[in-house]
Amino acid sequence: MVDEIDNSDADDDYEDEHIEQMIIDNGILLHSLATLLVRKGVLKQDEIDAEMDKLYDEMENFDKEV
């Protein structure tokens, strides 16, 4: 029984680390894509900044609701 609990905790830690790494990787990809779109003139930096501000506001509101 103890082994099952220990393995479950190890699996949860692995999953948490995997999710964190996916978030970091996706953040890097998103940042690179945004930079490319600005460089190509498809988007303006202020448009990206405004969207990021909205996203951070939504995340703060979500944290307060939970």
Image: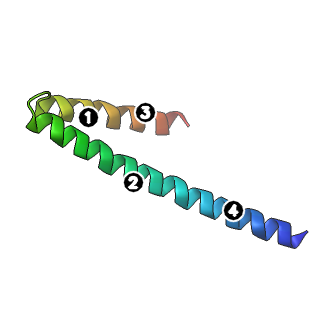
Q: Place residue 52 in its image quadrant.
A: top left
Query: Of callouts 2 and 3, which one flags the residue occurring earlier in the amino acid sequence?
Result: 2
Residues marked 1 and 3 touching at CB (< 8 Å): no
Q: Is residue 51 left or right of residue 59?
A: left
| Residue at the spot 52% in from the left edge and 53% down from the top edge | 19
Query: Of callouts 4 and 3, which one flags the residue occurring earlier in the amino acid sequence?
Result: 4
Q: Nearer the viewer, residue 57 or 46?
A: 46
Disc 3 residue type?
Answer: Asn
Number of the front mark, 4 or 1: 4
Query: Of callouts 4 and 1, which one flags the residue occurring earlier in the amino acid sequence?
Result: 4
Disc 1 residue type?
Answer: Asp
Residues marked 2 and 3 touching at CB (< 8 Å): no
Residue that label 3 marks = 61
CA neighbours of label 3 inside 10 A, class few (<14), some (14 to 19), many (20+): few
Q: Position of residue 33 (x, y in %)?
A: 24, 40
Q: Quadrant of the C terminus?
A: top right
Indicate the colouring scheme.
Answer: rainbow
CA neighbours of label 2 inside 10 A, class few (<14), some (14 to 19), many (20+): few
Residue 11: image tag: 4
Q: Position of residue 60 (x, y in %)?
A: 40, 38
Does residue 10 sit above or below 29 in this rendering? below
Q: Is residue 5 left or right of residue 41?
A: right
| Residue at the spot 81% in from the left edge and 66% down from the top edge | 5
Q: Nearer the viewer, residue 56 or 17?
A: 17
Q: Is residue 11 left or right of residue 41?
A: right
| Measured Cα–Cα span from mark 1 to mark 3 | 12 Å
Residue that label 2 marks = 24
| Measured Cα–Cα span from mark 2 to mark 4 | 20 Å
| Measured Cα–Cα span from mark 4 to mark 3 | 31 Å
Query: Of callouts 2 and 4, which one flags the residue occurring earlier in the amino acid sequence?
Result: 4
Q: Quadrant of the N terminus?
A: bottom right
Residue that label 1 marks = 53
